[in-house]
Image (cartoon, rainbow, N blue to C red):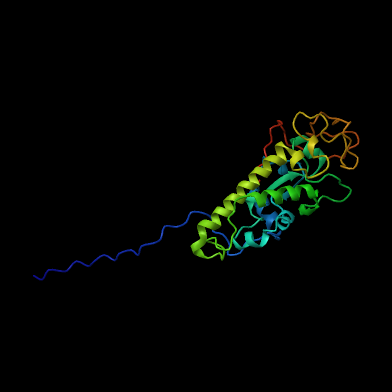
């Protein structure tokens, strides 16, 4: 009887081990796009305990701003490495009213509310000192943005360099975020930034306006705006129960 030859197994083609890091766009973005707000809103959609879902008016903030990128003089080079300021690692929700900021113990993103509060409030309206501080830190970061650096042209062979630059800038965002929360005098977003730290009795100073905010006035409700506001403040219906330990997080 003829011996049937064993059919050789088809060898599976060897696959390159996938790079587990998130892919970077061929060209990044160092100015604001139209989708950043949608990204961060989606990121917290299921977090019902987030202050934004409990009456605290909040706006998305670019930690590394487009203005700072421009001020640094490195925007074009950074963009060629695929870095995008509009991704979650560089975004954070900040309280956008003095009452919300007072309640959370975090400096406000804006304070004078004679105009409607818009989710898409322009980051570029922050004090120039903020943008200059961020620009200096971008320039001081060891990014390796030289013409002979592997990765300058943004090809696939340059993934390591591109991810290194993203990692360095993401770390910078984290450092600046800590300044916004812990050392607001070094990263002021309004002129009243320094008075919202936990333990400071001034907080909102009993007003809804940065223009009327006085440093010799204290919050008239003891920094507790849970369904509460001062006699000269509007009702904001804040239901978030603050323990004075709220922590800002990138992408949230």
Image spot of residue 212 (x, y percent): 91, 40
Residue 134 makes an appearance in the image: yes
Q: Quadrant of the N terminus?
A: bottom left
Residue 250 makes an appearance in the image: no
Residue under the point 47% across and 56% down: 19
- Which residue extends farthest left? 1
Relative to 17, say whether 108 is above or below. above
Relative to 207, say whether 117 is above or below. below
Q: Is residue 232 left or right of residue 27?
A: right
Residue under the point 81% across and 38% down: 99
Relative to 57, say whether 9 is above or below. below
Image spot of residue 35 (x, y percent): 68, 59
Residue under the point 41% across and 60% down: 16
Image spot of residue 144 (x, y percent): 58, 55
- Which residue extends farthest bottom? 2
Image spot of residue 243 (x, y percent): 70, 30
Tell which of 235 and 100 is nearer to you: 100
| Number of marks | 0
Q: Quadrant of residue 201?
A: top right
Tell which of 128 and 11 is nearer to you: 128
């Amino acid at each position: 009887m003829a011996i049937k030859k064993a059919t050789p197994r088809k060898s599976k083609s060897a696959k390159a081990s996938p790079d587990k890091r998130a892919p970077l766009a061929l060209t990044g973005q160092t100015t604001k796009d139209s989708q950043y707000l949608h990204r961060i809103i989606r990121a917290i959609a299921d977090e019902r305990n987030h202050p934004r879902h409990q009456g605290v008016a909040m706006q998305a903030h670019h930690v590394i701003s487009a203005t700072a990128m421009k001020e640094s003089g490195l925007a074009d080079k950074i963009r060629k490495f695929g870095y995008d300021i509009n991704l979650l690692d560089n975004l954070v929700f900040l309280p956008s009213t003095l009452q919300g900021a007072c309640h959370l113990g975090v400096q406000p993103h804006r304070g004078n509310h004679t105009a409607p509060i818009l989710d898409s409030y322009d980051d570029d309206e922050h004090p120039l000192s903020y943008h200059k501080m961020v620009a200096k830190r971008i320039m001081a970061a060891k990014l390796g943005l030289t013409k002979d650096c592997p990765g300058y042209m943004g090809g696939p062979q340059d993934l390591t360099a591109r991810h290194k630059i993203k990692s360095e800038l993401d770390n910078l965002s984290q450092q600046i975020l800590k300044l916004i929360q812990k050392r607001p005098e070094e990263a002021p977003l309004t002129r009243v930034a320094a008075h919202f730290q936990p333990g400071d009795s001034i907080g909102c100073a009993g007003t809804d306006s940065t223009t009327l905010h006085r440093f010799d006035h204290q919050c008239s409700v003891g920094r507790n705006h849970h369904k509460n506001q001062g006699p000269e403040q509007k009702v904001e219906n804040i239901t978030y129960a603050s323990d004075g330990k709220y922590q800002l997080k990138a992408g949230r």
